[in-house]
């Protein structure tokens, strides 16, 4: 398996370095023969190549099976003409990474504000309100006059169908319960289409429990009783917001692992941003990116039918449990280690798992 590694901005290099150590340990311990190809994205690439991401980098990624993308300072990238391209959108759009899989669960030994739960947000990743990627050319945001702005949202039957199918396939391996999240009471056409298509796909999966929730009420439901949910499928922006909430409810945004999956490539990317407020202090939680890398290994193992990758991914999950339970973790999840030391402790445990 070939994986391009891009450290990104802010806390990105710190959590990516810990993740690389874990991937190398997983490769040795489980005989994965991983090939890690190190490159740049974000500010470091802007300085070196004049752009946050480059066509040459995309070619290298296309020739690989996947990538690990550290968080990038996307809010600072305003002008594509100056090479300031949002790397997330670049890869999601160029590689058609349409399914954003964001699991959230609580852990023994970590106080969770709303009690135990284990769920997955399945978020459509290629259209919706994301103005920099929902058009073939141009941008889905328009300034009509200096005081009037319009933001367009794109919803297509085909994107709804494939994300619904991703959610139902996932639910087949979990507790066969899918919750559809929408705002079809107001966005009757766009969210109405999403809801209709999800219900149509649901008919292909007998024995499935399907319910639906309006997105604003859903925020209250997950805070009140997150344990009633298992797989949640929703459109792009709702999923982005909801999954930050569910990972914080699990104990910390620093546990927010996420996979962006398409037909041919997978991208491990923490759900959070570059966290400039804690960058360079060796305090960022690396579990978000380590868990994302585990999701990437599992995705690759399932599609190529190589069980060693699936076992390595399961080991990453259970070492995370052990690390949190024993306090070998960063402060945000109750430990007293730095980012680097958390990665080293994790790697030691993983090597023993082989
Ligand atoms: P953020 O997600 O970076 O941080 C929000 C809060 O969570 C901060 O208090 C931060 O310290 C904390 N946090 C985040 N990751 C953590 C970790 N691993 N361990 C411990 N604490 C963690 O959101 P922000 O500060 O609003 O955004 C910073 C930058 O990141 C912006 O430029 C934004 O556009 C960008 N961003 C990038 C991505 C991405 O690359 N996928 C996603 C979201 C935001």
Image (cartoon, rainbow, N blue to C red):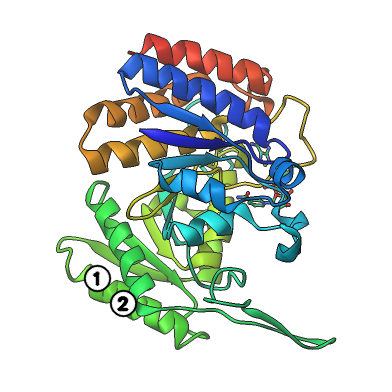
In the displayed structure, 237 sits above or below 184; it is: above
Q: Position of residue 99 (x, y in %)?
A: 40, 57
Mark 2 secondary-structure assignment? helix
Answer yes or no: is residue 103 visible.
Answer: no
- 354 horizontally vs 108: left or right: left
Q: Position of residue 177 (x, y in %)?
A: 29, 57
Q: Outermost residue, left direction?
A: 206
Disc 2 crowd rating (10 Å Cα; few below 14, some 14-19, many 20+) is many
Residue at 71% in and 57% down: 83
The residue indicated by pointer 2 is 197
Task: Measure the alpha-carbon separation of dots 1 and 2.
Answer: 6 Å
Please tell me which residue lies in front, 261 or 174: 261
Mark 1 vs 2: CB contact within 8 A: yes
Image mark for residue 201: 1
Residue at 62% in and 30% down: 15
In the displayed structure, 133 sits above or below 246; it is: below
């Amino acid at each position: 398996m070939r994986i391009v590694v891009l450290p990104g901005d802010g806390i990105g290099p710190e959590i990516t370095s810990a993740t690389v150590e874990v991937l190398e340990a997983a490769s040795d311990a489980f005989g994965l023969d991983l090939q890690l190809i190190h490159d740049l994205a974000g500010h470091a690439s802007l300085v070196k190549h004049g752009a946050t991401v480059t066509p040459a980098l995309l070619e290298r990624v296309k020739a690989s099976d996947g990538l690990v993308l550290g968080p990038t300072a996307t809010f600072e990238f305003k002008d594509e003409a100056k090479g300031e391209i949002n790397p997330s959108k670049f890869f999601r759009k160029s590689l058609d990474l349409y399914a954003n899989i964001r699991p959230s669960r609580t852990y023994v030994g970590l106080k969770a504000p709303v009690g135990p739960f284990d769920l997955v947000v399945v978020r459509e990743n290629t259209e919706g309100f994301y103005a920099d990627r929902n058009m073939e050319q141009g941008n889905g945001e328009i300034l009509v006059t200096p005081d009037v702005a319009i933001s367009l949202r794109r919803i297509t039957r085909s994107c709804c169908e494939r994300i619904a199918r991703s959610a139902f396939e996932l639910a087949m391996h979990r507790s066969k319960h899918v919750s559809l999240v929408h705002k079809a009471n107001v966005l009757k056409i766009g969210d109405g289409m999403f809801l209709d298509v999800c219900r149509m796909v649901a008919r292909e999966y007998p024995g499935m429990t399907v319910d639906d929730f309006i997105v604003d009420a859903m925020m209250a439901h997950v805070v009140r009783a997150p344990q009633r949910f298992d797989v949640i499928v929703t459109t792009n922006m709702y999923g982005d917001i909801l999954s930050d909430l569910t990972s914080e409810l699990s104990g910390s945004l620093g546990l927010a692992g996420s996979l962006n999956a398409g037909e041919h490539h997978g991208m491990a990317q923490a759900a959070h941003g570059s966290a400039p407020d804690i960058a360079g202090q060796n305090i960022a939680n690396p579990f978000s990116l380590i868990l994302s890398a585990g999701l990437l290994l599992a995705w690759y193992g399932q599609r190529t039918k190589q069980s060693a990758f699936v076992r390595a991914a399961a080991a990453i999950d259970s070492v995370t449990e052990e690390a949190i339970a024993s306090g070998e973790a960063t402060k945000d999840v109750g430990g007293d280690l730095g980012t680097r030391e958390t990665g080293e402790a994790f790697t030691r445990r993983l090597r023993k798992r082989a």
